[in-house]
Image (cartoon, helix red, strand yellow):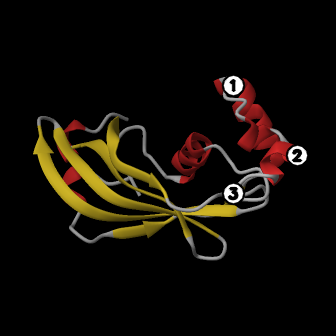
Amino acid sequence: MFTKTFEQYRMGDSWRSRGRTITEADLVMFAAFSGDWYPLHTDREWAAQGPFGQRIAHGMLVLSVATGLMVMDPGIVLAFYGMDRVRFVAPTFIGDTISVELAIAALTPKPKGGLVAASSTIRKQSGDAVAISTLKILVAAADEIRR
């Protein structure tokens, strides 16, 4: 999605990523990397007694995997600018396959390029949304591309 110069984006442009399945190894590695060993993610017996009846993926793991599913040209993407209104609207379970849908929501010119704001929906294989937000990426103008 983030492979075009700022001038090439249009309001309403949309894109959908490929899918990626969340594994038990993902939860364990993310817990080890982040230090987040909260039992809802890492303790099968504890999580079984909770509201979802099983372990769920860390919200930040879901966002991290989603970032990896987005196509970003390093000569065009200048910086990750942030995320607004992030909400986790449904659980992501071990074995769920997630993908990302983006739609351009706002375009703001900036020096050397512009800010692309996209409505982001992370969905699982059922089509249900698991996370929503507004993603903001700073992209280069055509005359500022680094190759």
Residue at the disc numbered 1: 33
Q: Earlier in the sequence, mark 1 or mark 3?
A: 1
Q: Residue furthest bottom?
A: 126
Q: CA distance from mark 3 to mark 2?
A: 13 Å
Q: CA distance from mark 1 to mark 2?
A: 22 Å
x and y percent of residue 66 in the render? 55, 51
Instruction: Kindly indicate whether the residue at mark 2 contacts the one at mark 3 (C-beta within 8 angstroms).
Output: no
x and y percent of residue 104 in the render? 28, 63
Q: Earlier in the sequence, mark 1 or mark 2?
A: 1
Residue at the disc numbered 2: 45
Disc 2 is placed on an element classified as: helix
Asked if residue 13 is positioned above or below residue 100 in the image, the reply reads below
Left or right of residue 32: residue 104: left
Residue placed most toward the observer, 6 or 119: 119
Bin the neighbour count of mark 2 within 10 Å (Cα to Cα): few under 14, some 14-19, many 20 and up: few
Residue at the disc numbered 3: 51
In percent of the image, x 69 and y 25: which residue is there? 33
Looking at the rendered image, the disc whose residue lies closer to the viewer, 1 or 2, is: 2
